[in-house]
Every structure is written in structure tokens, then in C-alpha cells.
């Protein structure tokens, strides 16, 4: 199987990640739940992972790195803990449901949500920010890179706007973390939400949020933390205020190793390799008369190509790719309904190809040949 569905999850993990998880499964106890060596080893591993995460994302406080099972939970914590009745929040039509659905809940609670539209290339107009600003605007929640069209938003520019107007900036970096340098301080991000299993090359079940010092988020979950057990309320101090229950120590050991892989390999090296294969694919198929490619292919962008072939249903194309050619892709709405409405692909869906550092030239060439053959038959 040629795996070109890395925007969903990276299948091929670095060996050091696999080894770290296997070792942790046999050695780590429960962090904060005991004084034995196994529990202490878990605590050390998790604290070290907090420090590596903070350095990687430019978060000034390692204790403000909060671990969750994925970016969706992180976004629910951030959005639900910052916004509510009477608040106005701005987002974009590019967003994944992990942003949209928590914001729909804010709207149901009596808040307001404005969606910045996109043009036919999937780009937002930054001038719209001033236009939609209201007296009760409290923050902007947006992605860094689109999981459908691959466009990358200039977060630093949005950060300047939010800081100027005293707003919160919550950013979903699920598609860009591990590919593009991200610095919370330079980009003026208040809350950064990430997942470990995509381009960070960590295990599934890992993710979190990095919170700027001074930002107070109400807990979404309450429960056991291993400290202040006689208090009726969740501890106030980060990170325990947002971490209830046993952490995924085994997975976080793998994420710890994944940061080592990324730092040793270099994000520039990873990004250039992915971009080379994405551009190779694009050049191979973009002149086909009945192939429609979506998005803006101007750098910077993530290494994915989303397309349709004629009037063929996207699921049919994806099935053909899988069963005839052994190529794994993602078809459908990609959990991002508003961008599909903007592209006019609600009924047809779209087929997404996405590369990782571990894909090869041969993978790409087989995918090009497959699309050409299916397009001739369509």
C-alpha cells in the first residue's frame, strides 16, 4: 500500500518513536499517583515532554503545556474555557469541525460567531478582520494550515491584529506542527492547540495546548489530579487545572522521541522533501482537462493536493485508487463543511493526497499514473 493520507495521520513513524512507546509500555507507572520508581519515571518523562513541547512551539512556560488526547479535545478546552454567552468570536470558512462545533456550542449558549469567507483559491481577506470587529469581540479562533486545500494563514499578521485590539488568539496547528516553525511569542498566539499523530510523528492519543502566561482557561474536565485531593474544586495551577485523570504516559514518551526526530532532522529538510513530492504530483496531473485541483499553490502551503475527476464521486475515485493501485487517500468532506460549500463540492466531495517525510518519488509517480488512467476512463 502506498500511503498518501498523512494529513489524517502519519502512518510511518520514526523508529525511535516506536521504540520509546514499546519501552514505556513496559516501564512507566502512573504520573503523580505514587512515589515508586515507575511513577517517578512517568513524571520525569512527562515533564521532559512538556519542556520539549514548550521549546518547540515557543511557549515561555513549560508548566502551561497541557496534554490532551488530541487537538479536538484541546480546542474544546480552549474555546469552552474562554468564550461563552455575550461573547463574539471570529473564525474562518476554512475550519475543521474541531473548531466549528465548539463554536456552534458557544453560539447556542448566547454567543456570536462570524465566519470570514474565502475566495475561489481558499484564501481569506485580512481586511475583513476590521470589518467584522464588534464591541463584544473577544477572540479569533483559526487554523494555521487547511486540511482540505493546504493553504497556510499568516498567523503573525492575525496576531498583530488581536494584540492591537486586546483579543484572544487561539490557533489550531494540527496540519502545520512539525512542518513549519511555530513560535507563540513571535506570532502572538495566546493558545496553541496541537495533535501529536500527524506531522509531529507521534502516537495517536497525544496532543495538547500551550497557553500564554496570564491566560486563564476554565477547566472542561474535573477529577483526579494526584494533588490537592481534599479540595472540592479542580486545582488552579497549570497544568493540573486542565488535566484531569491519568495522562497517556506511554504515548507521551513516543511524542518526546518524536520531538527529538524533528529537531535532529530539521523542519526545513522535512518540509522541502514533502514539498518536492507534492509539486511533482501537481505538475504531473494539473494539465489533465477533466481534473480540478483546489486551493492556492503558492508557498507557503502544506504538502497536500485535493482534486476531483470530472463528475465522478470522490469516494469512487478514492476506492479506485485503493483497490486498483494500492494507494491510500482521503475522500469526502474532510470534517470541514464550510470550505466544501465554498468550493461547491458538498455533493461530490473531493479526493485528498497528502505526503510525509517518508514518502518517495516512486509513490508519487504511481499516483500520477493512476490519476491519468482514471481520468482517461472518466
Image: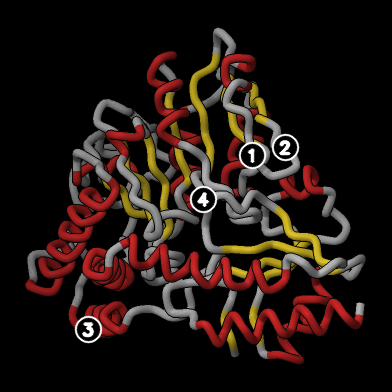
Q: Looking at the image, which is closer to me, 73 or 197?
A: 197
Q: Looking at the image, which is closer to me, 35 or 326?
A: 326
Q: Residues within 10 Å of mark 2 (few under 14, many from 20)?
A: few
Does residue 185 lie above or below 101 as drawn? above
Could you tell me residue 267's position as x and y percent?
A: 33, 61
Work out whether residue 105 can be spotted.
no
Q: Nearer the viewer, mark 1 or mark 4?
A: 4
Q: Which residue position holds label 3?
A: 23
Q: Secondary structure at mark 1?
A: loop
Q: Residues within 10 Å of mark 1 (few under 14, many from 20)?
A: some
> Circles 3 and 4: CB distance less than 8 Å?
no
Could you tell me residue 95's position as x and y percent?
A: 62, 44
Rendered-image quadrant of the N terminus = bottom right
Work out whether residue 162 can be spotted.
yes
- For the residues labelled 3 and 4, the Cα–Cα distance comes to 40 Å
| Residue 119 badge | 2
Kindly identify the residue that appears in the image at 26 percent across and 52 percent down.
56
- For the residues labelled 3 and 2, the Cα–Cα distance comes to 49 Å
> Circles 2 and 1: CB distance less than 8 Å?
yes
| Residue 123 badge | 1
| Residue 299 badge | 4
Amino acid at each position: 500500500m502506498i500511503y498518501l493520507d498523512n494529513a489524517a495521520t502519519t502512518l510511518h513513524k520514526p523508529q525511535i518513536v516506536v521504540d520509546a512507546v514499546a519501552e514505556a509500555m513496559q516501564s512507566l507507572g502512573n504520573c503523580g499517583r505514587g512515589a515508586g520508581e515507575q511513577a517517578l519515571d512517568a513524571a520525569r518523562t512527562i515533564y521532559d515532554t512538556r519542556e520539549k513541547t514548550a521549546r518547540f512551539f515557543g511557549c515561555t512556560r513549560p508548566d502551561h503545556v497541557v496534554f490532551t488526547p488530541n487537538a479536538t479535545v484541546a480546542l474544546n478546552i480552549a474555546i469552552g474555557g474562554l468564550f461563552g454567552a455575550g461573547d463574539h468570536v471570529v473564525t474562518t470558512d476554512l475550519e475543521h469541525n474541531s473548531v466549528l462545533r465548539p463554536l456552534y456550542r458557544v453560539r447556542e449558549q448566547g454567543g456570536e460567531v462570524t465566519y470570514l469567507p474565502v475566495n475561489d483559491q481558499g484564501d481569506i481577506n485580512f481586511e475583513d478582520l476590521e470589518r467584522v470587529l464588534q464591541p463584544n469581540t473577544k477572540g479569533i479562533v483559526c487554523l494555521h494550515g487547511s486540511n482540505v486545500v493546504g493553504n497556510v494563514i499568516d498567523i503573525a499578521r492575525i496576531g498583530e491584529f488581536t494584540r492591537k485590539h486586546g483579543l484572544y488568539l487561539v490557533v489550531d496547528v494540527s496540519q502545520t506542527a512539525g512542518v513549519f516553525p511555530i513560535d507563540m511569542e513571535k506570532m502572538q498566539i495566546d493558545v496553541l492547540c496541537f495533535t501529536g499523530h500527524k506531522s509531529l510523528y507521534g502516537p495517536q492519543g497525544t496532543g495538547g495546548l500551550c497557553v500564554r502566561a496570564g491566560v486563564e482557561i476554565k477547566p472542561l474536565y474535573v477529577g483526579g489530579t494526584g494533588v490537592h485531593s481534599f479540595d472540592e474544586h479542580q486545582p488552579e495551577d497549570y497544568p493540573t487545572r486542565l488535566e484531569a485523570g491519568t495522562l497517556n504516559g506511554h504515548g507521551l514518551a513516543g511524542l518526546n522521541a518524536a520531538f527529538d526526530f524533528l529537531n535532529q532532522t530539521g523542519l526545513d529538510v522535512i518540509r522541502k522533501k514533502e514539498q518536492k513530492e507534492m509539486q511533482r504530483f501537481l505538475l504531473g496531473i494539473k494539465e489533465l482537462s477533466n481534473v480540478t485541483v483546489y486551493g492556492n499553490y503558492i508557498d507557503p502551503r502544506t504538502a497536500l493536493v485535493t482534486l476531483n475527476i470530472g463528475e465522478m464521486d470522490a469516494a469512487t475515485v478514492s476506492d479506485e485508487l485503493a483497490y486498483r493501485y494500492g494507494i491510500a487517500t482521503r475522500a469526502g468532506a474532510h470534517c470541514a463543511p464550510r470550505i466544501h460549500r465554498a468550493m461547491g463540492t458538498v455533493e461530490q466531495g473531493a479526493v485528498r493526497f497528502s505526503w510525509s517525510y517518508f514518502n518517495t518519488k516512486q509513490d508519487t509517480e504511481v499516483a500520477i499514473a493512476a490519476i491519468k488512467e482514471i481520468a482517461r476512463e472518466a
